[in-house]
Image (tube, grey):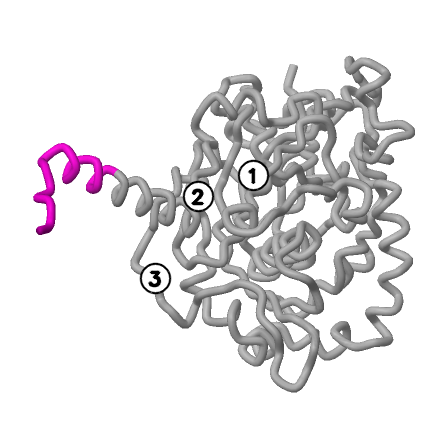
Amino acid sequence: MTKPVTWLELVLLCACLCSSQARAADALCPDAELWSGKLITDICWGCLFPIRLAGGVLDFRAPQSKGSGDSSVGDDLVPSSAASNVYCVCDGKELIPEVGMTMGYWGPARVVELVPNPWCAPTLGGTKINQSNVRLWGGSSPVVYDTDEIVFLNYHYYAFPIYVMLDLFWEDRCFADGYKDFDLLYVSELDPTWNNDELAFFTNPEVVLFANPVALAACSVDAVAASAGRPIDEMFWCAGAWGGIYPLSGHTHPGEGIAPRQTSLLMTRATAALHRRGLAHKTVGDDYVCGGTISPFIPKSQYATTMFYPVADTQSKHAIGESDLLWGAGHSYPGSGEYHVYILWRWTDCCLGF
């Protein structure tokens, strides 16, 4: 005769089922815990330095944290095209010229999350922005008649002016794009060119010139320069050791699983695509101290990255295209560790009024 189930056993069974469902949901859409204590502990606050002020460089970090001789070779260098003038003149109110001094600094500008589960937002606590479209599911899978793998991931692009939100800077000219709050700027699920290379070709026909073996062979030069912290802006079709930027879509290969190199490449492609569409600004150089301007090609030297999730980079940032052999070890693992969240740092030159 079967023993009847008591109410306590039913409660324990329901608790176990709910717990297992919660763990499954976390695996499919993990929480990066951006809006928690990790906002303080898992951001590389020392990456603000160096600061260039009136042509001089300020760096208050301890010598052991500046990256010399470790995995962050050259990550703290001022971009070669940064503003070098001491004084600047910008139009003020009613177009009256105002004199100031130049300032350049590294600051978190964007958060970019790369996810295989469409509409999943680890940055927003692991919530689903919308209902999933099965055709947009990403991941790593073998290609038919080939032993390589294809990786496809969706991305979400957020404004993240954390220095402004914390009221660390107040000069309006130092906010090149005008964003002063955390905001969702772009989702790839609504972009038909992101999951279709042919559509990406028609919107960016220059792919014919740069997505070929000859052009990609030249990227080895950019890979060496980027690994030394000096990506070459003129080679805008290259993402250094990460691969070619074109086509501007969410597919990349070959690879084994989902690694930091692949998500870093897709993050760079997403940024390049927004530059190409006039949705991102150039903020580095003497010509841009009065405000950023639209740049159709990505100025790689003005950007650097740190991973926030699943493994936080708290000691150094990485140049666009810097080899992941220098920094990417242990930065990915199966399951929720294949959801990557990056902080995109941007060098901003601006004119501080007197």
Q: CA distance from mark 2 to mark 3?
A: 15 Å
Task: Check whether the beta carbons of the residues at disc 1 and disc 2 lie within 8 A of each other.
Answer: yes
Q: Circle 1 is placed at which residue position?
A: 309
Q: Disc 3 on helix, strand or loop?
A: loop
Asked if residue 76 is positioned above or below residue 81 in the image, the reply reads above
Q: Circle 3 is placed at which residue position?
A: 132
Q: CA distance from mark 1 to mark 3?
A: 22 Å
Task: Check whether the beta carbons of the residues at disc 2 and disc 3 lie within 8 A of each other.
Answer: no
Image spot of residue 138 (x, y percent): 50, 64
Residue range in magenta is: 1-15
Please name the residue shown 85% across and 45% down the image.
227
Q: Disc 2 on helix, strand or loop?
A: loop
Q: Circle 2 is placed at which residue position?
A: 30
Image quadrant assignment for residue 278: bottom right
Asked if residue 135 is positioned above or below residue 348 in the image, the reply reads below
**Three-letter code, disc 1:** Tyr
Image spot of residue 177 (x, y percent): 54, 40
Q: Is residue 350 left or right of residue 250?
A: right
Q: Is residue 196 left or right of residue 328?
A: left
Please name the residue shown 74% across and 43% down the image.
329
- Outermost residue toward the front? 1
Mark 2 Cα within 10 Å, few/some/many (few <14, many 20+)? many
Q: Earlier in the sequence, mark 1 or mark 3?
A: 3
